[in-house]
Image (tube, rainbow, N blue to C red):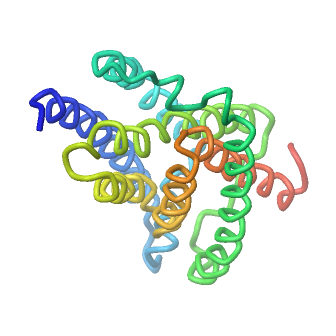
Amino acid sequence: MKESNIKYAKTALAITTTLTLFVAGFEVLMASSGYRFGMNIFDIATYANADMNVYCLILILANLILLPSAILLYHQSGINLKKEIAEKKTLGRDILLGLAALAATLLLALAYNFVYYTGRTGLSFTDADTSLGTTIIKIISLVFVSGICKEIYFRGFAKSFVGSVLGETKALLLFNLMFAMLDWYNFGFSFFAGLLWIWFYKKSGHLISSMIAHSGANLASVVYLIVISGGIG
């Protein structure tokens, strides 16, 4: 095994671990600050991103601050990031795979939400902010920044850099565990969604498929909150 492969793998792992610990740490801090006597774990978790504007800004900053390091890593290793994301000759097929992954994710979300919402009590956070400003920052943060950057960090890094050291499947599963840790407040939904996206990513060979699924699922969650709240207000 080349020494450079181990170096690239360590760098990729360090970048993704930094993102995971920073964002998850902020979520734990926010969740604990909202604790009141009588809450269960599902209630506490709803406060992880209760201040959605601050949460979205944290996501944007964390992802974008680390992005230059990610781009440099691809450049140093000689891997073309643009081609890892998409190639013209397979773009149509990859988009279709991404839409199929999105459909599967939404079905998973329907089943998962039934369990998740059943566990919550009246002490959970329910005051969803659907103002125009918050909706815009949510779309920027969750759909564009997270949907693109997280796929590079959690899927792309695993396959391109750590896979050569641990094996592709082990690397993808390891990074998917970190992905679930970052989104701990949804109690495993991100882990299972991540498994779906891994399958479609491997099927496609390009990150565009999982990016479509990830971004689309986040957009659906934004639209869903707007609908159940009676519109943007």
Q: Residue furthest front?
A: 89
- Total labels drawn: 0
Q: Nearer the viewer, residue 61 or 84?
A: 84
* Residue at x-position 77% and y-position 46%: 130
Image quadrant holding the N terminus, namely: top left
* Residue at x-position 86% and y-position 44%: 232
Q: Nearer the viewer, residue 4 or 31?
A: 4
Q: Residue furthest right?
A: 230
* 56 sits left or right of 162 in the view: right
Q: Residue 5 location in percent, x, y? A: 18, 32
Image quadrant holding the C terminus, namely: top right
Q: Nearer the viewer, residue 210 or 233?
A: 210
Q: Residue 3 location in percent, x, y? A: 9, 30
Q: Residue 201 location in percent, x, y? A: 53, 49
Q: Quadrant of residue 143?
A: top right
Above or below residue 141? Residue 158 is below
* Residue at x-position 36% and y-position 51%: 29
Above or below residue 77? Residue 213 is below
Q: Residue 14 location in percent, x, y? A: 23, 36
* Residue at x-position 61% and y-position 75%: 112
Above or below residue 185? Residue 7 is above
* 147 sits left or right of 38 in the view: right
